[in-house]
Amino acid sequence: MFDMLKTLCAKDGCSGDESAVAAHIISLLPDDCISYSDGLGNLIVSKKGIATPKNKVLLAAHMDEVGFIVTYITEDGYLRFSPVGGVNASVVIGRQLHFKNGTVGVIGTRAMHQMDKEEREKPVEFDELLIDIGASSREEAEQKVRPGDCAYFECGYTELGDGMIKAKAIDDRMGCAILLLLLKKRLPYDLTCVFTVQEEIGARGAKTAAYSIKPDYSIVVETTTACDFSGVSDEKRVCSLGGGVVVSYMDKGAIYPKELYSAAMAKAKELGLKAQTKTMIAGGNDSQSISVSAGGIPTLALSVPCRYLHSPSCMINKNDALALASLTAAMFCELCEK
């Protein structure tokens, strides 16, 4: 699973530009899977199990990552840009980026010693930032980059500390790796998975996929924000690395059925898996679209806690990810039989 995660994180695919990720997922599918892409770009994969389930259960994970899109090229060769997805401007200054054609850039702004005290104390805004690709004119820059091109964080996959992983795009390539792991197994029931697009800009892909598949239940396999570092009080930590699977009861996009929340917590206890829930109503995922589609679909969200989400250095704990994979498989079977 972690080998797949490493290769998935290396692929570039911000919202609306997920084709490279989809192609890589297809290359990893076993021969007994059937896959197709819908009109928006969602990759829908099905696999026959030993038996036909009582209920059709959809597993979902999103392929897209946060990134940047070029909006304008200045006369002196700098790139104006906007974030794609929820990126905080304070985490990007000085970061190296790359484009799919190999062009490299750095996000920059005026140096601190060129700002007055009031400017230094103001929060950074994206309209103050530029991407520097080393060009000296608009004409030179246009030979490498055009408005509408996407840029990505430059950050490798690293294992560090005691079972930690750091990489870009763990949100939600971790979920994608877990779905792939399941698709490679001999399954007790027929399985349908959707690798969705455009989650980071409003869970758009999940909406079209849910309407076309019309499952009886859905499980969204995700990452979610952990704020468990020094200086953050207990209730504002949301969740913690090493605390196990995060089972959501509510976030900013969905309220989850109490029976599914309770069933997942009970199943984790039965299997001896660590599980936790959020201490704040925070975040959101594809559940916000799936749960209100096709007449209403009972949806469960299972996540791995992740520090520094939507940054170049997402960080997770391997044991949390393994617990998430185990609970996802168990809840898939439980909902198939429900």
Image (tube, grey):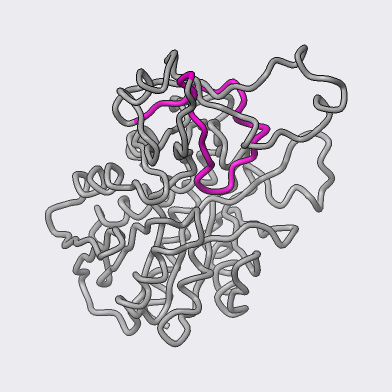
Q: In the image as oriented, which residue stretches furthest toward the right?
A: 117
* Vertical arrangement, residue 275 with respect to residue 106, above or below: below
* Vertical arrangement, residue 325 with respect to residue 269, above or below: above
Relative placement, left or right, of 85 versus 142 is right
Relative placement, left or right, of 148 versus 163 is left
Relative placement, left or right, of 236 versus 90 is right
For the point 57% across and 54% down, the residue is 245
Image position, residue 153 (x, y; %): 47, 30
- Magenta segment includes 224: no
For the point 39% across and 37% down, the residue is 147
- Observer able to see residue 37: yes
- Magenta segment includes 91: yes
Q: In the image as oriented, which residue stretches furthest toward the left?
A: 31
For the point 53% across and 31% down, the residue is 312
Image position, residue 160 (x, y; %): 54, 24
Quarter-of-image position of residue 87:
top right
For the point 42% across and 56% down, the residue is 198
Which stretch is magenta?
76-99
Quarter-of-image position of residue 279:
bottom right
User: Which quadrant of the figure contains the C terminus?
Assistant: bottom left
Quarter-of-image position of residue 141:
top left
User: Which quadrant of the figure contains the N terminus?
Assistant: top left
* Vertical arrangement, residue 258 with respect to residue 225, above or below: below
